[in-house]
Image: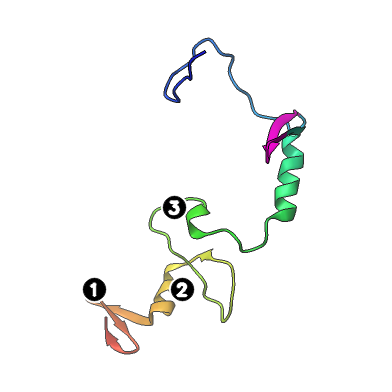
Amino acid sequence: MANTPFNTFVTGLPSAGALAGTELVPLVKSGTSSQSTPAAVATFVAANLPANSIANASLAQMASNTIKGNVTAGLANAVDLTVAQVKTLLGIVAVVDSIAVSYFGAV
């Protein structure tokens, strides 16, 4: 049997449904095959994924016109910032005639 390219469509298959969490799914690690439930896999990942170990590229996509940041005094998880928080971080105290004015003068 020839290899099927990934862009080939197979017709006549039944519709896929959501997993209930109790189905057995195949797992392969280091050449060893086993089976587990999606719920067990999710529990394992949650228990073994170190906190604060996800890179920015792996984060969920953001809504348009949003900025994530940290407005605390120390290390913290990123949050969606408000306009007021962004202005504070940038040192903007006022906007006069569409010119942002900071503590240090016009920016």
Between 41 and 4, the one nearer to me in the picture: 4
In the displayed structure, does residue 69 sit left or right of residue 91? Answer: right
Q: Quadrant of the C terminus?
A: bottom left
**Measured along the vertical axis of the image, is residue 30 above or below residue 64?**
above
Q: Is residue 19 magenta?
A: no
Query: Label 3: how many residues lie within 10 Å, few (<14), some (14-19) or many (20+)?
Result: few
Residue 52 position, x and y percent, is 62, 64
Residue at image position (59%, 76%) is 75
In the displayed structure, does residue 52 sit left or right of residue 37? Answer: left
Residue 79 position, x and y percent, is 53, 65
Query: Label 2: how many residues lie within 10 Å, few (<14), some (14-19) or many (20+)?
Result: some
Q: Secondary structure at mark 3?
A: loop
Residue marked by disc 1: 98
Q: CA distance from mark 2 to mark 3?
A: 17 Å
Residue 13 position, x and y percent, is 56, 13
Q: Are marks 1 and 3 in contact (CB under 8 Å)?
A: no
Which mark is first along the chain, 3 or 2? 3
Give the magenta range: 23-32
Q: CA distance from mark 1 to mark 3?
A: 25 Å
Q: Which mark is residue 71?
A: none
Task: Please name the amino acid that badge 3 sits on.
Answer: Ala
**Measured along the vertical axis of the image, is residue 54 above or below residue 77?**
above
Q: Mark 1 or 3, which is nearer the eye?
A: 3
Task: Please name the amino acid that badge 1 sits on.
Answer: Ser
Residue marked by disc 2: 85
